Image (cartoon, rainbow, N blue to C red):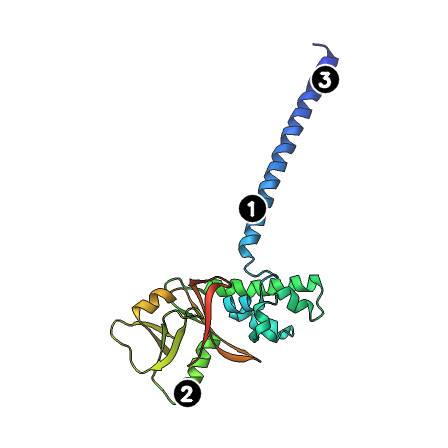
Amino acid sequence: MTKKEVKKAVKKEVKKTVKKVVKKAVKKETKVNKSDSNKQKQTELVTKDMTLGELIGMYPETLNILLEKGIHCVGCGAANWETIEQGLSAHGMENKDVDKVVNELNTIALKQEARRNSNSIVFTNEALKEVKNLLKQEKKTGYGLRIEVLADGCCGTQYNIDFEKEKKAKDVVIALKGLNVFVDPKSMKMLKGSIVDYINTPAGSGFKIDNPNIVDDNHGHGHDSCSC
């Protein structure tokens, strides 16, 4: 083989190797991008096309951010059809600002999900504080809190929250900070994984239950407002 032929053969081999390396790198990059995309989808619990009602129903703790941004219609009928994007845009926010708020809402939603206990019922600090305030107002020192699931009605699953002195036979007792929560076995089965929160809006206030065991056709997780 002449010198010219050797040079040509080496050049051909180098070109072949470079092509293979580039192809491998592109394939790896595509795989990484796909993985990142899937991961992003998994962490996007809140999207700007969700209605305000859906957002508050599933992630009550996001309420404060909405109020800070001037969204006060979270408790009225408009919340059932107005999306997060529409609500924020109506208050003069541009697309980049809307995206920023949605990211903030996602951060809160993720923190809420991280606290969820699939084998029990979780009370937010706001809910626990309100229960204790009500106990003090009604002078029911030493009482516990009963929470139960009532039969489904035309408005969906209904809950009852009330004070009770002692637990009943077969009750599941959840010990919180200075408060016992009583739940009957049937209700406990339906409430496992739920998060109880207390929200206060210009349209009203009350306890809100985010229950992942009950699927609502419009809102995903089943939720409802209750009061003691």
Mark 2, residue position: 136
Q: Against 125, is 83 above or below?
A: above
Q: How far apart are the two marked residues, 3 and 1, measured between alpha carbons? A: 41 Å
Task: Tally the numbered discs.
Answer: 3
Amino acid beneath label 2: Lys
Q: Against 220, is 2 above or below?
A: above
Q: Residue at x 71, y 21 (%)?
A: 11
**Secondary element at tag 3:** helix
Residue 25 as seen in the image, left or right of residue 175: right
Q: Is residue 64 visible?
A: no
Q: Residue furthest right?
A: 4
Place of residue 156 in the rendered image (x, y in percent of width and height, measured from the top left): 43, 68
Could you say which quadrant of the image residue 186 lies in? bottom left
Q: Against 181, is 4 above or below?
A: above
N-terminal-most mark, 1 or 2:
1
Could you say which quadrant of the image residue 136 lies in? bottom left
Circles 1, 2 touching at the beta carbon (< 8 Å): no
Q: Residue at x 64, y 69 (%)?
A: 87
Of the pair 78 and 90, the residue shown nearer to us: 78
Mark 3, residue position: 8
Which circle, 3 or 1, is nearer the viewer? 1
Amino acid beneath label 1: Ser
Place of residue 181 in the rendered image (x, y in percent of width and height, measured from the top left): 35, 75
N-terminal-most mark, 3 or 1:
3
Residue 64 as seen in the image, left or right of residue 214: right
Amino acid beneath label 3: Lys
Say which mark, if any, is on residue 35: 1
**Secondary element at tag 1:** helix
Q: Against 43, is 24 above or below?
A: above
Circles 3, 1 touching at the beta carbon (< 8 Å): no
Task: Please state, as top left, top right, bottom left or bottom right, where the N terminus lies in the image.
Answer: top right
